[in-house]
Amino acid sequence: MGAGELNVLVVDDDFRVANLHAGIVSALPGFTVGTVANTLAAARAAIAATAFDLALVDVYLPDGSGVDLVREIRFDAMMLTAAIESETVRAALSAGALGYLVKPFDHAALAARLAGYARYRRILSAPEIASADVDAALLALRQTTTGAAAQPAALASPTKDLVLQAVRRADAPMSAAQVALAIGISRATAQRYLAALVGAGGLRMQLRYGSTGRPEQEYSAGPTR
């Protein structure tokens, strides 16, 4: 984990969904995924062993409710779930969830919420803040679109256009390494621009599962739906 990165715990009973969410998180600058857990027990074990900044938690877990986990933890959490019962939403917010995102959702929607959360953390990083800062922090949590202001100024460049064109012209989804090779930039730079384009809805990201190892992130043209 790099210095200053927000460490995220992803909790979902479906390992493919959990890995998809983890891929979206890890593609965003300033975030890293510390652990992916598919049960309450696994999540609790990870929390006992690791310091996290944020948990992304499903309600429906095989050994209990994600709302109970949010109530237990002493760091930030958001719910990513298909649960739409009003009582469940109220319980999650009462337990301390900072956000509630209903499945299915676009990749860009989660990216926007995470960008808002990062801004929330930055605003509240000062020892003391003004009333206007409190309002701004709470507003950041309700961010539902990444927008131009959420993207680093450096991403508005010809390199971004080259990355977008490379993916759009490809006959098949491309990895960050393939994009980097195609246009002659570093993999890290390609990853940064790809993450920004996914967050803005210009590209979609999916995971490719091999026979071994972690799934690889691949990018293709068109906004997620």
Image: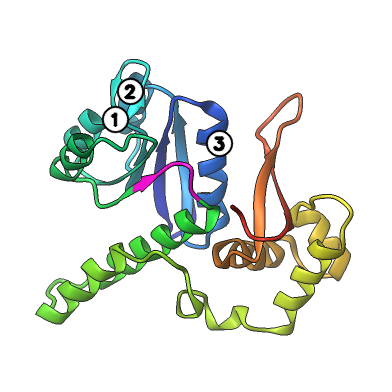
Residue 66: assigned label = 1
For residue 111, above or below residue 77: below
Q: Secondary structure at mark 2?
A: helix
How far apart marks 2 and 3 lie (CA) works out to 16 Å
Q: Main secondary structure of the magenta part?
A: loop
Q: Earlier in the sequence, mark 1 or mark 2?
A: 2
Q: Position of residue 59 (x, y in %)?
A: 32, 31
Mark 2, residue position: 40
Q: Residue furthest top?
A: 63
Mark 3, residue position: 19
Residue type (three-letter) at the residue carrying disc 3: Asn
Q: Secondary structure at mark 1?
A: helix
Q: Position of residue 40 (x, y in %)?
A: 33, 23
Q: State left or right for residue 88 relative to residue 40.
A: left
Q: Residue at x 54, y 53 (%)?
A: 107
Q: Nearer the viewer, residue 40 or 189?
A: 40
Q: Earlier in the sequence, mark 2 or mark 3?
A: 3
Q: Residue at x 17, y 74 (%)?
A: 135
For residue 45, above or below residue 56: above
Discs 1, 2 touching: Cβ within 8 Å: yes
Q: Which residues are magenta?
A: 101-105
Q: Position of residue 78 (x, y in %)?
A: 31, 46
How crowded pointer 1 is (Cα within 10 Å; few <14, some 14-19, many 20+) is rated as many
Residue 130: in sight, yes or no?
no
Q: Earlier in the sequence, mark 1 or mark 3?
A: 3
Q: State left or right for residue 104 relative to residue 99.
A: right
